[in-house]
Image (spheres, rainbow, N blue to C red):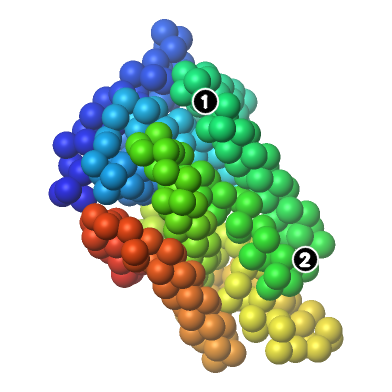
């Protein structure tokens, strides 16, 4: 985004400097990851919020860095759990360095995030991040548990994505505000914005898994279905069925998935209104998020960034 282009350059430089280890394998792996920057949504949110309060400072860059470290470490661990071969169009770390090295590099990045947290020297900020780390783990484990059970209600789905995705967005926005101006009322608004942004973003990601292609997304698609992870489009369809019909429906989808019949899967979900229902829920969270900051001045760039993210097609 042009309004923070200069600040993102500063962030990227500091971020990579913070991760240097002096160990060849670690530094090579981190350099490899650095080439796959993605959209850098979380650092951008940090910078845009601090900019709206006219106070991008050293702590802003520290917060942006540690949030990105936690996010990247989580992605590395996710790819190991999912046996993913692609990440952002590149071979995943597990594919290049195998799981043992990948796991240890993910742990190293997470440990660097922890050391960055202590540099903030603020117990309130440390408490927020400690709570967030707990929620991230809980959300991931809940998803794995439900995939093994082959069950997921809509209410549990929201609980799961709140922990595994939205909690980090929420912490990112709250911390940026707290390190910029320390206004509790404004920080609460930004925290709510981040939570809603994160909920909408995970729903969008789940929708992309159904509707997108590997080429456009830079990672495998239909992975949720292949891993028995029932996301909102599938959950809404299942909620319209009896138990026997649910079993037949899931067996049918799995067969189509194994045969890579992607268009057929999409057609079934669209016919049962799974796609439109999911889009409506995503829109609700986006609207709630923007409403939480509409009375805060100087947030137009943040609003524009949000609209651009959610208007992008897979």
Q: Is residue 102 left or right of residue 160?
A: left
Q: Element at badge 2?
A: loop
The residue drawn where x is 53% and y is 32% is 125
Q: Mark 2 or mark 1: which is in front? A: 1
The residue drawn where x is 31% and y is 42% is 50
Q: Is residue 140 left or right of residue 60?
A: right
- Quarter holding residue 228: bottom right
The residue drawn where x is 24% and y is 60% is 300
Q: Position of residue 170 (x, y in %)?
A: 50, 50
Q: Residue furthest top?
A: 22
Identify the mark nearer the N-term, 2 or 1. Answer: 1
The foreground one among 265 and 39 is: 39
The foreground one among 171 and 32 is: 171
Q: Is residue 273 left or right of residue 185?
A: right
- Which quarter of the image is occupied by the C terminus? bottom left
The foreground one among 70 and 249 is: 70
The residue carrying mark 2 is: 150
Q: Position of residue 102 (x, y in %)?
A: 55, 29
Q: Is residue 140 above or below residue 204?
A: above
Q: Is residue 72 above or below residue 222?
A: above
């Amino acid at each position: 985004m042009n309004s923070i282009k200069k600040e993102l350059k500063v962030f990227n430089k500091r971020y990579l400097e913070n991760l240097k280890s002096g160990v060849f394998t670690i530094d090579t792996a981190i350099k490899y990851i650095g080439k796959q920057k993605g959209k850098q949504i979380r650092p951008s949110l940090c910078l845009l919020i601090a900019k709206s309060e006219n106070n991008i400072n050293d702590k802003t860059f520290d917060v942006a860095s540690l949030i990105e470290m936690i996010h990247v470490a989580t992605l590395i661990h996710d790819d190991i759990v999912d046996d993913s071969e692609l990440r952002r169009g590149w071979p995943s770390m597990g594919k290049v360095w195998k799981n043992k090295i990948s796991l240890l590099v993910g742990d190293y990045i997470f440990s660097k995030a922890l050391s960055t947290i202590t540099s903030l020297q603020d117990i309130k900020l440390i408490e927020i991040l400690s709570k967030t780390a707990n929620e991230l783990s809980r959300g991931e484990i809940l998803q794995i548990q439900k995939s093994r059970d082959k069950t997921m209600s809509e209410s549990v789905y929201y609980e799961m994505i709140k922990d595994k995705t939205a909690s980090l967005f929420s912490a990112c926005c709250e911390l940026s505000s707290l390190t910029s101006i320390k206004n509790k009322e404004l920080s609460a608004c930004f925290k709510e914005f981040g939570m809603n942004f994160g909920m909408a973003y995970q729903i969008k990601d789940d929708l992309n898994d159904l509707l997108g292609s590997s080429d456009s997304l830079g990672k495998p698609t239909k992975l949720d279905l292949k891993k028995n992870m029932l996301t909102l489009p599938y959950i809404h369809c299942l909620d319209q069925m009896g138990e026997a019909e649910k079993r037949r429906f899931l067996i049918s989808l799995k067969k189509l998935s194994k045969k890579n019949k992607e268009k057929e899967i999409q057609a079934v979900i669209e016919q049962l209104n799974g796609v439109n229902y999911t889009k409506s829920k995503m829109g609700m969270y986006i609207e709630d998020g923007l409403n939480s900051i509409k009375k805060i001045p100087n947030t137009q760039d943040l609003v524009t960034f949000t609209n651009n993210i959610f208007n992008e097609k897979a």
